[in-house]
Image (cartoon, helix red, strand yellow):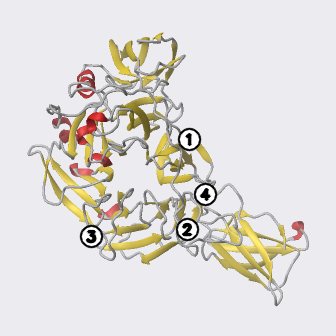
């Protein structure tokens, strides 16, 4: 794959391309885009962000210098065309791969900023530079999507955990031989039931649910690695009708305690589409930023606005922005398949929705609204090649065309996977998971695999993902639709399921996970009409409970075992023949050891 990305350097003729200028101006074709590409091609010895030629940088931008291990910044000169010289401080990345210069005051909207620095890379001292323009921000409409009605019966309720109300999970095709082991990672929202990250087993049984406050949504729940150990990672925040989110990414350990959070830097808010941790302790995330823009040349209003897609690599420990890339200045307006709206909404012309760093100093981006994938050189910010869309670097073979896609990822042997929505407006009859084989020498792309659900027609107008599983299996999450399906390598269904009606779930993942909550088990006791008690026990997130033991007595200090029962799901209900004033429960593992005890409650 590295040879493919190294060979396919695309410069492309841009004659006749519409490029948009700042509000109140109309830039000709050889303007913002060509200037950005030319500046980015300058031989900087390392990546400097905002990248050269960025036309809409934040007024709160830090200047990021990202290079190899041991990179040091010796001196920085930052000059705004209106704001003048900027003092500031240098802060090192925890990775040892560079530093950020944090200006003491913001830049002025619309001004051009030039940066020149001396950097030491190994034994050499070099000069690095960048120049960018500061955006004029557009107002952001804070209106969220209204709650879909859904099905009031498709909500889970528990006696021992009455505060939890997640969507049901119904398995329509039970896991068949060959299904990958693990737990399903979901983050339902909309429809009935509360929003939040959720883990279920492959029978649909709840394992863990982290219920969020009203109007707060989660996406992208998955197991990733941070500092050498598995962690739960997800995004949470508000989903705006503008088509993006405003929030942050959080990391939880196996005891379900927050250990880190990843926020967007430079004055942006983290979007819901991507969070990807690296072994180096960094996170790749995305953000959306509406800026004022003259859209007359694209058929819009002169006083319009445009939502730019922004990618950042963030140092998790320090929160510093190590790298930043803007679609505006690299992806031309003429590549968009999304019509220019009226004056009410900013034009979401690109809508970058996935990020996958490659092994050769590159990162693969998917832009839903251009029907294209982009391989971007990290040091320069240049697009090495495009796959799909109106300026594809490859000729797409039969069945390889995709529309409104999500979740593009590099796979072994030079392949690329993605979720082909095919909809909004519909271009296909069903959403698909596709595996593509680019050929660098022939500049062609062949379709290797296309996965569609044979039981039901599923056409997801938004969201969705395609996850590679062990043994050649694949898991599709249908995003806007509540469905998910696992396929074997031949395309046969191994597992099929659905959340409640009208529930959305941006991505569905599956992973091995072992959790033992820091909080104690929960229980409830109810008297029975004929005497005795019904005990309900649960431990939200515990994965190794095999048995529940009930203790009862006249006081909290005099409890003795009175009943034992095998765990029967998220909540186990046990009947005790004689009522006692106080009860508690103990969680036992498969060896019979006590791994958790509840507080004693009055029955």
Relative to residue 339, is residue 506 drawn left or right? right
Query: Do tag 4 and tag 2 residues touch (Cβ < 8 Å)?
Result: no
Query: Do tag 3 and tag 4 residues touch (Cβ < 8 Å)?
Result: no
Vertical relation: 538 (above or below) 98: below
- Crowding around mark 2 (Cα neighbors within 10 Å: few <14, some 14 to 19, many 20+) is many
Quadrant containing the C terminus is: bottom right
Relative to residue 399, is residue 451 drawn left or right? right
Q: CA distance from mark 3 to mark 4?
A: 33 Å
Q: Which residue is mark 2?
A: 167
Q: CA distance from mark 2 to mark 1?
A: 26 Å
Q: Report helix, strand or loop for mark 4.
A: loop
Residue pictured at 31% horizontal, 59% vertical:
421
The answer to which of 192 and 44 lies nearer the viewer is 192
Q: Earlier in the sequence, mark 3 or mark 1?
A: 1
Dividing the picture into quadrants, the one containing residue 492 is bottom left
Q: CA distance from mark 2 to mark 3?
A: 28 Å
- Crowding around mark 1 (Cα neighbors within 10 Å: few <14, some 14 to 19, many 20+) is some
Q: Is residue 361 visible?
A: no
Q: Which residue is mark 3?
A: 491
Relative to residue 193, is residue 322 drawn left or right? left
Q: Report helix, strand or loop for mark 3.
A: loop
């Amino acid at each position: 794959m590295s040879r493919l990305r190294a060979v396919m350097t695309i410069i492309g003729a841009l004659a006749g391309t519409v490029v948009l200028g700042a509000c109140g101006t109309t830039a000709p074709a050889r303007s913002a885009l060509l200037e950005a590409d030319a500046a980015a091609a300058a031989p900087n010895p390392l990546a400097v962000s905002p990248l050269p030629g960025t036309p809409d940088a934040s007024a709160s931008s830090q200047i990021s210098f990202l290079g190899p291990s041991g990179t040091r910044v010796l001196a920085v000169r930052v000059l705004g065309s209106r704001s003048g010289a900027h003092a500031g401080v240098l802060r090192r990345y925890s990775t040892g791969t560079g530093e950020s210069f944090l200006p003491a005051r913001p830049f002025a909207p619309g001004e051009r900023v030039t940066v020149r620095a001396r950097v030491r890379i190994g034994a050499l001292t070099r000069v690095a530079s960048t120049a960018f323009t500061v955006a004029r921000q557009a107002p952001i409409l804070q209106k969220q999507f209204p709650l879909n009605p859904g099905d009031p019966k498709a909500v889970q309720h528990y006696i021992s955990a009455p505060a939890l109300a997640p969507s049901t999970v119904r398995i329509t095709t039970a896991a068949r031989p060959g299904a990958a082991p693990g737990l399903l990672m979901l983050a339902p929202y909309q429809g009935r039931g509360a929003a939040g990250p959720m883990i279920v087993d492959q029978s649909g049984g709840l394992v863990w649910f982290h219920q969020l406050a009203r109007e707060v949504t989660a996406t992208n729940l998955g197991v990733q690695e941070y500092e050498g150990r598995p962690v739960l990672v997800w995004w949470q925040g508000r989903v705006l009708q503008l088509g993006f989110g405003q929030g942050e990414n959080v990391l939880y350990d196996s005891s379900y305690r927050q250990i880190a959070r990843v926020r967007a830097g430079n004055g942006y808010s983290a979007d819901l589409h991507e969070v990807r941790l690296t072994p180096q302790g960094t996170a790749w995330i995305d953000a959306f930023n509406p800026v004022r823009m003259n859209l007359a040349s694209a058929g819009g209003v002169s006083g319009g606005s445009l939502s730019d897609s922004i990618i950042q690599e963030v140092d998790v420990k320090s929160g510093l922005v190590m790298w930043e890339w803007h679609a505006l200045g690299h992806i031309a307006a003429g590549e968009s398949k999304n019509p220019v709206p009226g004056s009410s909404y900013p034009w979401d012309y690109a809508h970058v929705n996935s990020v996958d760093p490659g092994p050769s100093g590159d990162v693969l981006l998917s832009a839903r609204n251009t029907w294209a994938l982009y391989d971007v050189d990290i040091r320069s910010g240049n697009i090495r090649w495009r796959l799909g869309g109106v300026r594809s670097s490859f000729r797409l073979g039969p069945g390889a065309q995709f529309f409104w896609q999500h979740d593009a990822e590099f796979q072994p042997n030079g392949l690329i996977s993605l979720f082909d929505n095919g909809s909004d407006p519909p271009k296909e009859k069903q959403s698909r998971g596709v595996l593509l084989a680019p050929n660098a020498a022939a500049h062609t792309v062949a379709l290797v695999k296309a996965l569609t659900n044979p039981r039901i027609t599923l056409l997801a107008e938004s969201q969705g993902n395609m996850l590679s599983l062990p043994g050649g299996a694949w898991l599709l999450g249908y995003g806007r639709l509540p469905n998910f399906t696992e396929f074997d390598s031949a395309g046969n269904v191994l597992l099929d399921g659905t959340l409640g009606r009208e529930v959305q779930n941006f991505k569905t993942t599956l992973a091995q996970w072992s959790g033992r909550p820091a909080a104690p088990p929960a229980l409830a006791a109810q008297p029975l009409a004929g005497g005795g008690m019904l005990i309900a026990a649960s431990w939200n997130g515990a994965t190794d409970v095999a048995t529940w033991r009930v203790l009862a007595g006249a006081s909290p200090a005099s409890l003795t075992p009175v009943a034992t029962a095998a765990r029967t799901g998220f909540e186990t209900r046990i009947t005790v023949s004689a009522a006692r004033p106080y009860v508690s429960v103990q969680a036992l593992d498969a060896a019979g050891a006590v791994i958790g005890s509840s507080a004693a409650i009055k029955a």
